[in-house]
Amino acid sequence: MKFLIAILALGVAAPAVAQDAAQPTTRDADALSKARAIGTKARKVKKFYEPKFDLSGLEPFRPSAPMKGKLRQWGNNYIKDSGLVEVWEAGFRKYHPDVTFDDNLYSSAVGFPGLISNAADLAPMGRQALWDELKGFEREGAGGGEDGSSSTEIIEIVMATGSYNVRGWSYALGAFVHKDNPLSKLSMEQLDGILGAQRDGGWDGLTWRTDWARGPEKNIRTWGQLGLKGEWANKRITVYGYNMKYHFNDEIDKKVLKGSSKWNETMRAYSNVAGLKADGSLTAGGELITNGLAADKYGIAYTGIPFANPNVKMVALSQNGGPAVPMTLETVQNRTYPLIRDVYYYLKKEKGKAVDPLKREFLRYILSREGQEAVQQDGKYLPLTPAAQREQLAKLDR
């Protein structure tokens, strides 16, 4: 069993060395881990947002008959680091005192290995499942059905909205340009043209969709293609972003590039580094990205608001012909901003059968007004809207 889990965990690659030769070179894995821990230690005890969102529209928790049993959780360390999971578990046990928890919360990277090997009942994750993780789950259950198909399926529950600007806590992503750039907004299609390249299709989960193909004529490589005039018209756009092992790229790939993994061929890629700051904390790739953009009048970057500096600005984003929405705390929480990130619970169930009652009950509690109030009190992730809550509850009842 331990060997299987180790092999599966290796399928989720660690951040790789950045491709930009101008970056610092201190990327020893142990040094990076220690530097990350220094920054996380300070953030996990801080409340970044005071309670301000009206949660009265959320359904309160209505417990079923008292339950007993154990729930094993493998995955996201950030709900443990902040103590949020302990608050959830204590609140749940007020209604179900005979339920116990066994938590192995060290990284989202262990979530799917735990589920696939049946070592975990629930996998909380700070990001959406990767293609390899979904494929591993599919293969593990293959042949279980009478027709040779999988007998199990994965259920994805959004447990909260990611943060607005808290490093580590799944902060929203934005498109940044130099402060002197006259551009103020972009559509998601335009962002695809800038960050992406021609493609033959894209992945929708584990389904390859050729209807998501697009040709090179939709590539955007100069500022003039976005309507900028004068000195900007013929200037090449330089893209600043993360190297391909980072999960930020998976988020952009799914939401902007249609799951194609086809990126702008000249993108400058960055990685985290350690050993640059006086307190020993991590210098994030996002900081290096915006530093690069600050020195490049004709660049564009994608990263989060924690790494903004006075020489860059964020542009508003629109999708499906709607209005351009700026990234603010309010537009992230109300989920109108296009590049929010979510945090998840994953679980598996037998096809054609209901979700296990104990798993369903605990997730119902997390999604309830009481569970989301705990999110708000923690002050890092953001509570769900009533519409998002209803959507997630419906998945548990299917």
Image: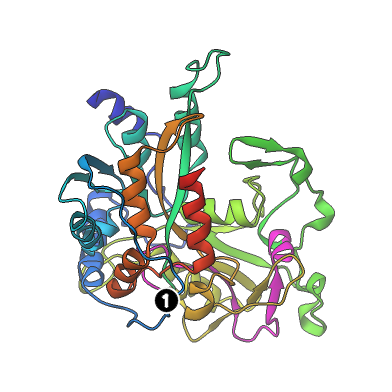
Question: Which residue position is annotated with label 1?
Answer: 56
Residue 51 is left or right of residue 18, and the answer is left
In magenta, the rendered stretch is 165-193
The structure residue drawn at horizontal position 25% and vertical position 65%, both measured from the top left corner, is 40
Q: Quadrant of the N terminus?
A: top left
Asked if residue 108 can be seen in this view, the reply is no
Q: Residue furthest right?
A: 217
The structure residue drawn at horizontal position 42% and vertical position 80%, both measured from the top left corner, is 53
The structure residue drawn at horizontal position 48% and vertical position 45%, both measured from the top left corner, is 397
Residue 152 is left or right of residue 4, and the answer is right
- Is residue 189 a member of the stretch shown in magenta? yes
Q: Quadrant of residue 313?
A: bottom right
Residue type (three-letter) at the residue carrying disc 1: Ser
Q: Position of residue 229 (x, y in %)?
A: 82, 82
Q: Quadrant of residue 82?
A: bottom left
- Is residue 326 a member of the stretch shown in magenta? no
Q: Is residue 215 above or below residue 43?
A: above
Q: Between residues 139 and 102, which one lies in front from this camera angle?
A: 102
Q: Residues within 10 Å of mark 1 (few under 14, many from 20)?
A: few
Q: Is residue 155 above or below residue 148?
A: below
Q: Quadrant of residue 110?
A: top left
Q: Position of residue 353 (x, y in %)?
A: 46, 31
Q: Position of residue 209 (x, y in %)?
A: 72, 39
Q: Between residues 251 and 69, which one lies in front from this camera angle?
A: 69
Residue 122 is left or right of residue 218, and the answer is left
Q: Secondary structure at mark 1?
A: loop
Q: Position of residue 49 (x, y in %)?
A: 34, 80
